Amino acid sequence: MSLVNVSRRRFLVGSSAAGLSLGLALPFGARRAHASADFPDEINAWVVVQPDETVIIRIARSEMGQGTLTGLAQLVAEELDCDWNRVTTEYPTPTENLERGRVWQSFATGGSRGIRESHQYVREGGAAARMMLISAAAADWGVPASECSASKGTITHGPSGRTTSYGKVAGAASRLEVPEQVSLKDPKDWTIAGQPLKRLDTDPKVTGAQVYGADISLPGMLNAAIKQCPVFGGTVKSFDAAAVAGRPGVRKVVQVGDDAVAVVADRWWEAKTALDSLPVEWNFGEHADASSEAMAKIIGEALDADQAFVGNERGDAAAGLERAAKTVQATYAYPHQNHATMEPMNATVKYTDDLCEVWCPTQNGEGALATAAEASGLPPTQCQVYKLLLGGGFGRRGAIHDFVRQAVLIAKQMPGTPVKLMWTREEDMTHGQYHPVTQARLTAGLDDDGNVTAFRVRIAGQSILAGMMPERLGGGPDPVAFQCYAPDGDHAFAYDFENLLVDHAMRNPHVPPGFWRGVNANQNTLYTECFIDELAHAAGRDPLEFRLAHMKQHPKNAAVLKAVAEKAGWGEPAPDGVFRGLAQCTAFGSHIAACAEVSVKDGQLVMHRIVAATDCGTAVNPQQIEAQVEGSFVYGLSAMLYGECTVKDGRVQQTNFHNYPVMFIRDMPEVETIVMPSGGFWGGVGEPTIAVAAPAVLNALFAATGKRIRSFPLKHHDLSAA
Amino acid sequence: MAKLNVNGRDVEVDADGSTPLLWVLREHLGLTGTKYGCGIAQCGACTVHINGQAVRTCVRPLASVSAGDEIVTIEGLSEDGSHPVQQAWRELDVPQCGYCQTGMIMASAALLAKNAAPSDDDIDREITNICRCGTYRRVRAGIHLAADSLAKDASKAGGAA
């Protein structure tokens, strides 16, 4: 995928100035799925076929490495019956979406929803385009469309054997009405979707040609570096712009909102170094004394709080504990984490009195557009967001576009001049939207046979929704906090326990929370799956057998668990000194399991091999699912091994990769992925495996050492033999 | 004006000698394939070759590089993106978001230039670039694939001689 998007492409091929404002001339609010004089080569909103047979598939969701761009293109191409080798893609802009009655629907790319939420309508778009192309050929030939078929972009009239191509009839097809009734293929008949095809976006990523937001360059563009108040909630008191005014390249020093200062210069390095020597005074505000220890104390006390939101309750947990022959209890804690995308936050903005243009990596183009409109004061129809491929997203670039707001506020102070704002890694580390901090106390009863009589989970701590979108909660419970403890649905708790109570005592520190890849499935599954292991041990039962005995109502979870156990050789001797651990869950609509093999040598954990299984219902690109599973282990295990953001004096102490270390290639275990779609549903892929990564390894670590780790990261624990 | 040799071309840049080579490449020469990730030589996204060695340019001042040093960036690794490492990366679909991959490719190419058949231990020791998407498994496979391809080329060349 190149920089080219709908507007820009037409800008390039059409008349110069009209192109960029093309969308603005369209009637607002009219849902136009079919082409018109404005879009002459568009079959419908999803498909453009050019005379040279190139097929351009429109992709509304964002590509950040997770492969959704290729997967969605496969789904459209499958129904279109085009030649996959001729397929390319482009992003429509969110403003165009608005003006065309949201014909492309949601742009949001998070929660592993990119494909599972849009597969139906993108496939219908491809199927409708195929019908239109066939109808156009049939009309030209004067034969019934029912006598014609299409394959790889060639249309054939069965009785006569005549053929034509999509490119030849595209013009005529684009003038037809878009059919409302289309039928979709059975996935078992797929030849493009469901196949392990190569990604469409690889080539420029290996030649250096890929333009990320950090790389964009516009004529006359200036560069900005920003410094935000180190303490969340603090504000700028004063700064001495004159102190850096004479430095090379410096054009302007500006305040950005009430909590940040930026230097704008010819080059970013000039802006950054000037900012380093800019005297700034801050009002640190009410959180200047906040610390991780104080937060942990408040959250820990909430483990005993009388009031909590109930997320899942069945039977009578208290009674079940009463009649238990044995009670087991453990308390776990999970720290703040930073997303640490490789590409730091950035956005480029050109502001004039009647148009605000934004070039940025975003997981939600419409969210970026709303932020641009709010910050610029212009209506959304006078804003444009041109999405770029993301250098990592992981949830950081989706819900709150702080970097877009800042870039607009800077550019607004320099009308007509494009300005690229890029954060330093240090700003990125200390002004994130952090994985929420929580603790959990788990209590369970076992009867004389080692079966669970009751399962009780008290979660205490931070709510993402309360921090990011409190209006959605209205002071009530945060349903996202109960991921993997839900009664049913995408994050159903995957055990049968007849007496169950899970509740959440919400305590929100001042550190802004965010959706961090895997979200609350991460720590909730860690809590459950490590504690289940504790129960199996307390019951004197095999962890696999113990789990399976308590998940008879969850056959898909049992299936993935058995699959990893079998492939890993559970029950058979492991190599000398190597120990195994299991974990499973339902997350983001998929059923996931992992079996890890580890050893401990000289007090150091060595992760040898992980077998992982995913039942995502429907597999759109198996090799990309494997890539997501492999990557999920890196993300989840980096957090388990090293990840924590601690707060002192109200500010995050970790500033860069030297004190927020992550996994290197040397830490990477061998990963064997079993993709086992059972059909009939569409589950997410980008996130769920993260949830099983840490508990599978921790349970193996327990098997190896007898040490049960309940606070993280692991680097704080001594693993040498007791 | 500082004189540099970048991707086989002699160029002059007007930048302060303290400017890291990364920003000279990106902002003065427009070579944006070399990325900023951390600024403290921790992540390797800014890796280029200087006289064949992998170098993290975010901490390498312009003044420390001379006109005689041969600097190669991802844009100059091969004329048409056909370096064995680039081909292996395509073959195995290594990149995810891709932001770290140009640095990863440059580090891998430098490793192969001095060690034609690196073991897993060699890779563990030499490749310390950070990838947050978690492409490490395919990076390792890609280095081995590129090594195989280089070995085949070498044996072909040997056979013809």
Image (cartoon, helix red, strand yellow):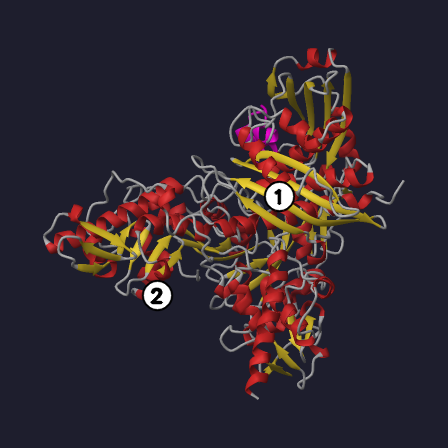
Determine the chain carrying the residue at label 1: A
Q: Position of residue A70 (x, y in %)?
A: 44, 53
Picture layout, residue B107 above or below residue A110:
below
Classed neighbour count for the residue bearing mark 1: other residues with Cα under 10 Å, few (<14), some (14–19), many (≥20)? some
| Residue at screen point 70% across, 62% down | B120
Asked if residue A721 lies left or right of residue A185, the reply is right
Q: Secondary structure at mark 1?
A: helix
Asked if residue A407 lies left or right of residue A230, the reply is left
Residue matched to label 1: A567
Q: For residue A328, what is the image quadrant?
A: top right
**Residue that sits furthest to the bottom in the current view:** B161
Which amino acid, mark 1?
Answer: Lys
Q: Position of residue A508 (x, y in %)?
A: 67, 31
**Residue that sits furthest to the right in the current view:** A722
- Evaluate whether label 1 is on the same chain as label 2: yes
Residue matched to label 2: A12
Classed neighbour count for the residue bearing mark 2: other residues with Cα under 10 Å, few (<14), some (14–19), many (≥20)? some
Q: Position of residue A239 (x, y in %)?
A: 69, 54
Residue in front for this viewpoint, A39 or A534: A534
Q: Which residues are magenta?
A: A465-483
Determine the chain carrying the residue at label 2: A
User: Looking at the figure, which quarter contains the N terminus of chain A?
Assistant: bottom left
| Residue at screen point 65% across, 72% down | B112
Which amino acid, mark 2?
Answer: Leu
On the question of residue A515 being in view, the answer is no
How far apart are the two marked residues, 1 and 2, measured between alpha carbons?
A: 53 Å
The tag earlier along the polypeptide, 1 or 2, is: 2
**Residue A470 within the segment the image draws in magenta:** yes
**Residue B50 within the segment the image draws in magenta:** no
